[in-house]
Image: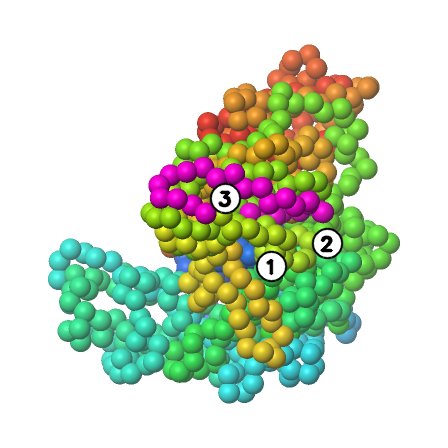
């Protein structure tokens, strides 16, 4: 038993002091990915999270799906899903949780953090104070856990603020902004005026469930009983729940930090008012048996402070896709601003304008320009309000955070501060280390001097030549214009044979298009177009456009819309091949062509979108001469996703156990292998609510083994579902030969790899 007598003095809390290499405040998706990345590189990390679970807006407490540059596959950013740890998490979630249960995502995040012994995880722990070692440096922070009544003194040479509101950066005195800049500060024509509002509000979500029997609902007294007067309520869809109700938003006219609880209460009033109206107005008998299963208790917060780095990202950086020497991440979500009045306003719930492709994010936006040992991550990076409208989404924040973690690793190694990464070629080292771990940086090619694969003679059991795709898939109506994307190299375009089915004699226009900017996937330049006649019924048509290809990149063989015509598709799916349609995804657009108002600095262009599996078939075709998009050289070209080409090697479709042989002219000491598989970077992999029809990506190789020159099996992998497989040998393998043997899982999908790195 414990018994203490009265004391005149104030008692002190239990205090623990923890010294580490890196303190991260904020356990949202950004802070979590930052901690995992740093810890895997040997850094001792303390991760401070003021909630009982990790994931922030993506957790079961808030239940927003994780998205980034893929934007629900509703833009022209092909193969744009973020790489590295966030990709690993999303693929693991798909494997374990294709239903999109947010509770399962919680377990995955906790598992990945607690599996690393050099992460000290402090849940339910809020940072509340700090001490500085002079005006420009943090010495330690104070945090308190409400569950164990313990305060923590956390000391480290480096700190990361991923707290959302920037509590650590604010208390440290770092320069920040809150609200919208004037249009002339960064020459941002899309900057909002006061009538639209300068801040994005909060949202709360709710779920309902059909119980199969009548359910009574008595509204709490604080419910808004005049909810049917809200303009936004008139568009309410009874089948929507969870994060599809993002428009239940409020607070953009308030202080989104200090009035957050006030905003939450108003959102509760709205949600319970919505449910009361649905249940008790008599207008919706179909919800008689429904119960209100879950209502969020923590709002999903979009915006508060943004802190200043050595560069502030702005509208033209995104729209013009500007190139930065210190680019270490990318974005691609729309410039997405919300009216400040939210659910109480007359305006549409958001104004989204897309860029023609992904944009680079420079390292200089990810550390404080004032506090020498402070990194910025998550939504508080150095960006204008307009640029923030895109960079704020979770997958982008997580991708940035991984770059911050790797920068912290370099800072530890060289005993330098974050800004000094920009000196002595360290940015290139940072980029290489990130890409090695599976991240993607536009225009960066991995070239490691120590990569032994670069010196190997590589041969394969087969290589797929693309002569066509079999005519064995479903018919696809040309209700919308459609195009087969093909990676082509300079030379004459082969003649192409397609199969059509026409309900009457009609005509169709076939075009060859390409993007204006290299590496984009917005088909806007028409190179040639010809009209062809079709007769009633099924028929093959050979199309010879008589055009020479000038540059290596993706081209679009496009067919005009004609409701009287269907085109045959193929069951064959292959890495880097896609069919797209000129239509829109209502989750992120309202028409198939983006036509912004003049004078807001946004470009007009057409959306060409793929279909999700189980649809998403390529068109069936035959080429008069084959093309070679799957060269062996792609295995060592240092790019691990499609860009201007597939960047992949693929085996012949009939090669069921393909192999890759690597031979050196002398014995090598090999410590590890990184193998990069195709997990379909074009698929958005939303983490919650939507669900997915598959638990594994059909392009990804599941089973393979690695042997040496003496046929000793060095490693055997079963049931892989991840993009990057890293094999570290306990002791370096001494050999002049490696043999990688793969098993084909699907007769319609050839085995393919993006790359191999041997260290």
Residue 738, percent from left and from top: 69, 21
Query: Considering the numbered disc 3 on the image, is that residue within a helix, a strand or a loop?
Result: helix
The number of numbered badges drawn on the structure is 3
- Residue 321 seen anywhere in this rendered image of the structure: yes
Of badges 1 and 3, nearer the viewer stands 1
Q: Which mark is residue 524?
A: 1
User: Quick one: 720 or 473, which is closer to the camera?
Assistant: 473
What residue sits right under mark 2 in the picture? 407
Residue 208 in the magenta stretch? The answer is no
Residue 669 image-quadrant placement: top right
Mark 2 or 1, nearer chain start: 2
- Rendered location of residue 668, percent (x, y): 78, 23
Find disc 3 in the rendering and name its residue. 91
Residue found at x 78% / y 62%: 419
Cα gap from disc 2 to disc 1, whole angstroms: 38 Å
Q: Residue at x 58, y 38 (%)?
A: 495
Quadrant where the image shows the C terminus:
top right
Q: Quadrant of residue 188?
A: bottom right
| Sequence-earlier tag: 2 or 3 | 3
The residues colored magenta run 533-557
Residue 127 placement (x, y as % from top left): 57, 66
For the residues labelled 1 and 3, the Cα–Cα distance comes to: 33 Å
């Amino acid at each position: 038993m414990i018994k203490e007598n009265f004391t005149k003095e104030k008692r002190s809390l239990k205090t623990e002091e923890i010294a580490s290499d890196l303190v991260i405040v904020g356990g949202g998706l950004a802070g979590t990915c930052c901690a995992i990345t740093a810890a895997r590189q040997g850094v001792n990390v303390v991760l401070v999270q003021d909630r009982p679970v990790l994931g922030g807006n993506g957790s079961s407490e808030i239940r927003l799906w994780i998205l980034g540059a893929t934007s629900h596959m509703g833009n022209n950013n092909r193969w744009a899903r973020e790489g590295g740890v966030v990709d690993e998490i999303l693929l693991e979630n798909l494997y374990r949780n294709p239903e999109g249960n947010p509770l399962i995502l919680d377990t995955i995040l906790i598992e990945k953090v607690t599996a690393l012994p050099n992460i000290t995880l402090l849940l339910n722990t809020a940072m509340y104070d700090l001490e500085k070692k002079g005006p420009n440096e943090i010495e330690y922070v104070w945090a308190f856990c409400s569950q164990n009544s313990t305060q923590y003194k956390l000391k480290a040479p480096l700190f990361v603020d991923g707290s959302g509101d920037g509590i650590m950066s604010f208390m440290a005195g770092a320069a920040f902004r809150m609200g919208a800049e004037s249009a002339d500060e960064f020459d941002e024509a899309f900057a909002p005026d006061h009538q639209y509002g300068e801040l994005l509000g909060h949202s709360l979500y709710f779920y309902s469930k059909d119980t199969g029997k009548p359910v009574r609902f008595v509204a709490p007294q604080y419910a808004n009983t005049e909810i049917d007067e809200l303009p936004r309520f008139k568009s309410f869809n009874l089948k929507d729940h969870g994060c599809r109700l993002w428009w239940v938003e409020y607070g953009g006219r308030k202080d989104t930090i200090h009035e957050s609880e006030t905003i939450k209460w108003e959102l509760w009033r709205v949600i319970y008012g919505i449910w009361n109206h649905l249940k008790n107005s008599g207008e919706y008998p179909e919800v008689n048996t429904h119960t209100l299963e879950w209502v969020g208790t923590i709002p999903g917060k979009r915006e508060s402070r943004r802190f200043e780095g050595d560069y502030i990202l702005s509208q033209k950086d995104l729209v013009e896709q500007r190139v930065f020497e210190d680019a270490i991440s990318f974005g691609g979500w729309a410039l997405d601003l919300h009216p400040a009045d939210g659910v109480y306003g007359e305006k549409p719930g958001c104004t989204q304008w897309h860029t023609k492709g992904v944009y680079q994010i420079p390292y200089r936006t990810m550390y404080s320009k004032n506090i020498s040992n402070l990194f910025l991550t998550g939504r508080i990076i150095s960006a204008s309000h307009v640029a923030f409208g895109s960079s704020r989404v979770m997958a982008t924040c997580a991708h940035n955070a991984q770059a911050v973690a790797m920068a912290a690793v370099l800072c530890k190694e060289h005993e330098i501060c974050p800004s000094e990464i920009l000196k002595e070629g360290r940015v290139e080292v940072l980029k290489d280390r990130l890409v090695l771990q599976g991240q993607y940086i536009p225009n960066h090619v991995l070239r490691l001097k120590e990569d032994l694969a670069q010196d190997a003679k590589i041969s394969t059991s087969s290589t797929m030549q693309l002569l066509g795709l079999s005519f064995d898939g479903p018919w696809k109506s040309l209700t919308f214009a459609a195009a087969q994307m093909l990676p082509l190299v300079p030379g004459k375009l082969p003649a192409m044979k397609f199969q059509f089915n026409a309900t009457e004699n009609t005509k169709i226009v076939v075009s060859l298009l390409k993007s204006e900017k290299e590496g984009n996937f917005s088909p806007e330049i028409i190179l040639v177009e010809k009209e062809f006649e079709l007769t009633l019924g099924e028929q093959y048509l050979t199309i010879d456009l008589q055009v020479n290809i000038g540059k290596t990149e993706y081209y679009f063989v496009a067919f005009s819309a004609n409701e009287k015509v269907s085109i045959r598709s193929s069951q064959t799916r292959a890495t880097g091949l896609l069919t797209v349609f000129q239509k829109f995804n209502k989750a992120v657009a309202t028409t198939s062509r983006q036509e912004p108002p003049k004078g807001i600095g946004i470009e007009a262009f057409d959306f060409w979108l793929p279909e999700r599996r189980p649809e998403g078939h390529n068109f069936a075709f035959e080429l008069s001469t084959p093309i070679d998009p799957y060269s062996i050289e792609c295995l060592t070209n240092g790019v691990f996703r499609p860009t201007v080409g597939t960047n992949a090697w693929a085996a012949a479709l009939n090669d069921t156990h393909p192999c890759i042989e690597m031979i050196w002219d002398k014995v090598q000491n090999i410590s590890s292998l990184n193998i990069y598989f195709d997990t379909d970077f074009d698929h958005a992999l939303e983490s919650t609510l939507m669900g997915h029809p598959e638990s594994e990506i059909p392009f990804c190789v599941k089973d393979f083994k690695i042997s040496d020159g003496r046929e000793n099996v060095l490693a055997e992998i079963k049931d892989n579902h991840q993009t990057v497989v890293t094999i570290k040998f306990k002791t370096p393998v001494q050999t002049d030969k490696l043999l990688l043997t793969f098993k084909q899982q699907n007769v319609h999908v050839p085995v393919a790899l993006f790359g191999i790195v041997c260290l």
